[in-house]
Image (tube, grey):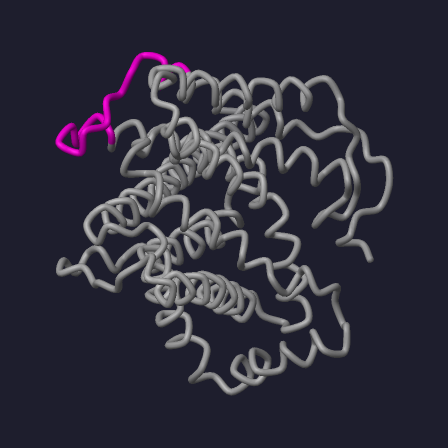
Amino acid sequence: MNKTTENTTKNTATTTASTTVVGVFVILTVLAGMLGPVQSLVNGQLGSVIGDGHLAACISFFSGLVVMFAIVLPQKKLRTALFRLPSQLKNKTLPWPYFFAGCCGAVIVLSEGVSVGSLGVATFQTSLICGMVISGIMCDRLGIGVEFKQSLNVPRVLGAVLAIVSTVLVVYPVFTAPHVIVLAVLPFTGGLLAGWQPAGNSQIGHIADSMLVSITWNFIIGFLALTIGFLVRLAMGHATFALPTKWWMFLGGPLGLLSIALMALLVRKLGLLLLALASTAGQLIGSVTIDYAFPQLGHTVYAMTVIGTIVALIASGIAMIPSKKIGKGTESV
């Protein structure tokens, strides 16, 4: 074997090994993406059992907050950075909306507790992701949370249109039930808000020099917003307090944290684009699988649901195609 042939063989082996490693991490990311539907299922079941999706969201945020406190508070540097954030709001170090990015997550978790029981995990997740696709496109265009603004090219507009089509498809089988249509608006709205949330998280993480502090602040704001609303309902006699008796119903918050942690690790191996595509695929595949595997939950997986899920995945892929940079975004400031 001459040297050229030997080098070619080595390069081929290296490429094959690299492709295999990437393939393994893609599979791991798909599995990590499935945690989203599992979290939706837990929060949805919690809302159904205690009869109040709002209270279910409070419980989910509280369980996640407990975990974050256990991580952050024992560390002096992180604890100091966390306690300093309110003064950063007071001296206007950052625009005040960024400090309340946790409210976006609160809307998503609230919609899980309120609507998953009626919509099913597949319809919920598809509506959520479609809202996120449209939000991501608009945030890129306006330069929110990104280094550069990106123009609205044909692929991105097509991605947004397909996202809307996907939402219509998954809702179509239950179109005769008006209340279900209204419930589908909740995750879609949560998805629209979710596109802006990373901008706030990034800014808070920057001034605190820690994304752990940023995540904790998110949970604090989300929990306070939900709890204040629930206490008002409780005082008006429109709600009652109850706790679930099954331990796994407290796992909604920790599942969300586990998903965030895994994505943070996997992004270093795959990059943002491949990570986003693989995790979206995991969310959509996982949501359909859950509804199909647990028919006792009463959620039928219609052909339109599957078609809508596939269209949502295509929309996500198309919308992630980079477009022309047209100016600086908020991350460059």
Asked if the magenta segment contains residue 316, the reply would be: no
147 up-or-down from 221: above or below: above
Residue found 52% across the figure and 63% down from its top: 218
Q: Is residue 95 left or right of residue 60?
A: right
Residue found 55% across the figure and 23% down from its top: 163
- Residue 306 in sight: no
Q: In x, y percent, where is residue 255? A: 33, 54
238 up-or-down from 295: above or below: below
Query: Dividing the image into 4 quarters, which one contains the C terminus?
Result: bottom right
Residue found 68% across the figure and 71% down from its top: 207
Question: What is the quadrant of residue 83 in the picture?
Answer: bottom right
Residue placed most toward the observer, 134 or 282: 134
**Principal SS element in the magenta part?**
helix
Residue placed most toward the observer, 40 or 16: 40
Asked if the magenta segment contains residue 302, the reply would be: yes
Residue found 59% across the figure and 80% down from its top: 81
Q: Which residues are magenta?
A: 291-307
Residue extending furthest front?
236
Q: In x, y percent, where is residue 91? A: 76, 78
Question: What is the quadrant of residue 142 in the picture?
Answer: top right
